[in-house]
Amino acid sequence: MSTYAAPLEEIRFALHDVLGAEALFARLGHAEASRDLMDAVLEEAARFAVAVLAPLNRIGDETGCRFDPATGEVRTPPGFREAYAQFVAGGWSGLTAPPEYGGQGLPHLLGVPLKEMIDAANLAWGNFPLLSHGATEALLHHGEAWQREVFLKPLVEGRWTGTMCLTEPHCGSDLGLLRTRAEPQPDGSHAITGTKIFITAGEHDLTDNIVHLVLARLPDAPAGVKGISMFIVPKLRVGRDGVVDGRNAVRCGALEHKMGIHGSATCVMNFDAAQGWLIGEPNKGLAAMFTMMNTARLAVGLQGLGLSDRALQNALRYARERLQMRALSGPRHPDKPADPIIVHPDVRRMLLTQKALVEGGRLLAYHASALVDVAARSADAQERTEAAALLGFLTPVVKACLTEWGVECTYHALQCFGGHGYIREHGMEQLVRDARITTLYEGTTGIQALDLLGRKVIQLRGEGAKPFLAMIERFCAEHAGEAALAEFVAPLRAKAEEWWRLTERSTARAAANPEEIGAAAWDYLFHTGYLALAYWWARAVAAADASGHPQAFKDDKRATARFYFARLLPRTAAHAAAIESGIGSLPELA
């Protein structure tokens, strides 16, 4: 069985030493979010994740959710319901939600370590409250006053949960093809009819009511994505006055049989003239959807991070204990029958790859989350605008890279265990299976890549790419001439210049042939991701050197940064070559 320990030292380093969270929060009007309060929240979150959720991880995988076709009801694995009750009682569901709706109003960034720890401890359980946050954001930004009053309070309190009901059996990610219908009713509601698939937490026994946010078409809607509206469709009918009035005509038709996350209910949802309330303007549902989707994409990136960290912890422990063969240079532990496998260079390569991607990826994800707070609360309008642009640029990078690296890291962890990783005893194979879905839901890696290059760079004329480059250039300028950072600053600056040249050439080729966007997008995304991590590793070394951490901690950061620059950043060369090869290297397949 795999184990999990909350990485509080690394999380504190990210928040306090690298991002300067206390000063940031004070500047944004969150003076209550002091370092002491942050540390108290982290300690309690760690206790909940490690003591309550982690023991249920294997149980959820082995037992799974149970579906009753006669009633359409879903029962979660043993212990899940009790854990959710503790989650609600602890106030975790409303940690960052507005106080006027029952939340604690703390910064978004402070909720991110909680999410990371939950996902590492028990990814499947974490999916049940996951989309409530997205539903909350959609209601806050697009809902009417009565909708916020009626639906937000129970969502924030955790008495109800939320879902996103987007895709259908025939359309996948092409939402312009969806067929679910919305018929206006005399009372101002709509009758929603259709089938949605892959609905996370679409049905369960953790709460009495579930608030589905459903994409559907009005009778006079234009074709394609311009004719999509969004509706609030609760499991239990809810009127404008907040009165709950019996079961709505929405029901789970089946549970998907999945490769992983067995403890998470992935549902087929059938709507049969179910009562729904329009949220936002008619035919403008995509705006509300992307409010939810962007929140969810950052959250899924954290899932990849959490699984990677858990995998690393177990692989590192095993590599220190497992005795096998001798070091190539001779016995390191002559008193033992063999050396621990951590002495072997290839094992260290796998462990250091995980470590570099986990610790660097945490800084990337936390910074993007900090931008959510800056974009929402900064007193400087220009800073809000730039933060929103940079956040939009980084969102597909966080989602795609952290989940793909999650697959890589869990693979490396399994490989460290050898044959013992492939069997169930040590829990590595569950982490590998669970990680695979993170690259798929909330938009596949290919979709994230197209969003980054096609929309965020080309369509928006680099409004997020330019502040990204400026951020790197500022750091390099600030530390120019510092001998302690020279080994990182020079290659970082050179790589940023290379990235910008690729950006300009990709944009030019796309102007001549739009197919060039699809040809370059995947490699462009990863070139961007590796550049981003180079920046964060350089910053991590600078922050560690300036901190009060022990010298061993500082040395560890520098050694890992050196590994990253020497072994992982060179991957960008392959991505650059692929980008430059263009659409001509992708012949049509018969």
Image: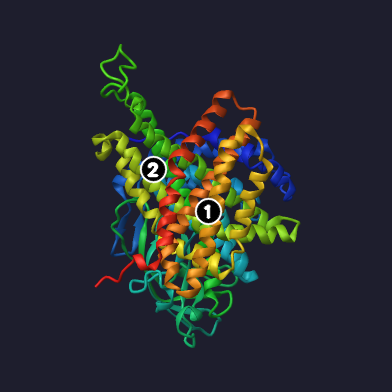
Q: Residue at x 39, y 39 (%)?
A: 311
For label 2, the SS is helix
Q: Quick one: 512 or 550, which is closer to the camera? A: 512
Q: Quick one: 463 or 398, which is closer to the camera? A: 463
Q: Is residue 81 left or right of residue 185?
A: left
Residue 327 visible in the displayed image: yes
- Percent of width and height locating residue 434: 35, 49
Locate the N terminus by quadrant.
top left
Q: Above or below — where is 91 with respect to 280?
A: above
Q: Residue at x 39, y 60 (%)?
A: 203
Sequence order check, earlier mark of 2 and 1: 2
- Percent of width and height locating residue 450: 46, 65
The type of residue carrying mark 2 is Cys
The type of residue carrying mark 1 is Glu
Residue 83 visible in the displayed image: no
Q: Mark 2 near mark 1, Cβ–Cβ under 8 Å?
A: no
Q: Above or below — where is 439 with respect to 148?
A: above
Q: Residues within 10 Å of mark 1 (few under 14, many from 20)?
A: some
Q: Find disc 2 in the rendering and name its residue.
A: 409
For label 1, the SS is helix
- Percent of width and height locating residue 369: 58, 51
Q: Find disc 1 in the rendering and name its residue.
A: 498
Q: Residue at x 64, y 49 (%)?
A: 473
- Percent of width and height locating residue 26: 73, 45
Q: Residues within 10 Å of mark 2 (few under 14, many from 20)?
A: many
Q: Is residue 113 left or right of residue 199?
A: right
Q: Residue at x 49, y 40 (%)?
A: 565
Q: Above or below — where is 119 with respect to 517?
A: above
Residue at the top extreme, as displayed: 335
Q: CA distance from mark 2 to mark 1?
A: 27 Å
